[in-house]
Image (cartoon, rainbow, N blue to C red):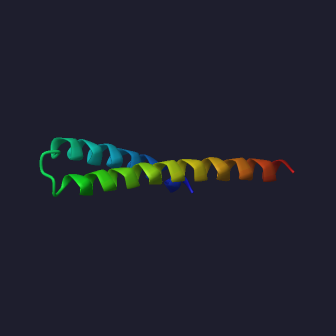
Amino acid sequence: MKYLNITKYIYLIAGVLMAIEAYTQWNDTSKRWVYVGFSCMAFFLFYFRHRFSKNQSHYNNNNKAS
């Protein structure tokens, strides 16, 4: 499950790159919303993966102790 720790940072990097691209293409109205949408989705996936891995590690630590 170590790949989950890596993929959450990949989502974070992708979100930052998409946000930068949306900022640079702000005058082009047709493409900016695509980049904004993908950026928001990447940040949501980062948050979801981060919460999931934190809850999973907390669950594993509690079950190993008993």
Residue visible at 73% across and 52% down in the picture: 59
Quick one: 22 or 17, which is closer to the camera?
Answer: 22
Residue visible at 21% across and 41% down in the picture: 23
> In this rendering, is residue 3 above or below 54?
below
Residue visible at 16% across and 42% down in the picture: 24
Residue 18 position within the rendered picture, expressed as x and y whole percent measured from the top left: 27, 48
Quadrant occupied by the N terminus: bottom right
Residue 63 position within the rendered picture, expressed as x and y whole percent measured from the top left: 80, 53
Residue 20 position within the rendered picture, expressed as x and y whole percent measured from the top left: 24, 41
- Snapshot quadrant of residue 33: bottom left
Residue 38 position within the rendered picture, expressed as x and y whole percent measured from the top left: 32, 55
| Count of numbered marks | 0
22 horizontally vs 38: left or right: left
46 horizontally vs 30: left or right: right
State the residue lying farthest toward the left: 28
State the residue lying farthest toward the right: 66
Quick one: 34 or 59, which is closer to the camera?
Answer: 34
43 horizontally vs 32: left or right: right
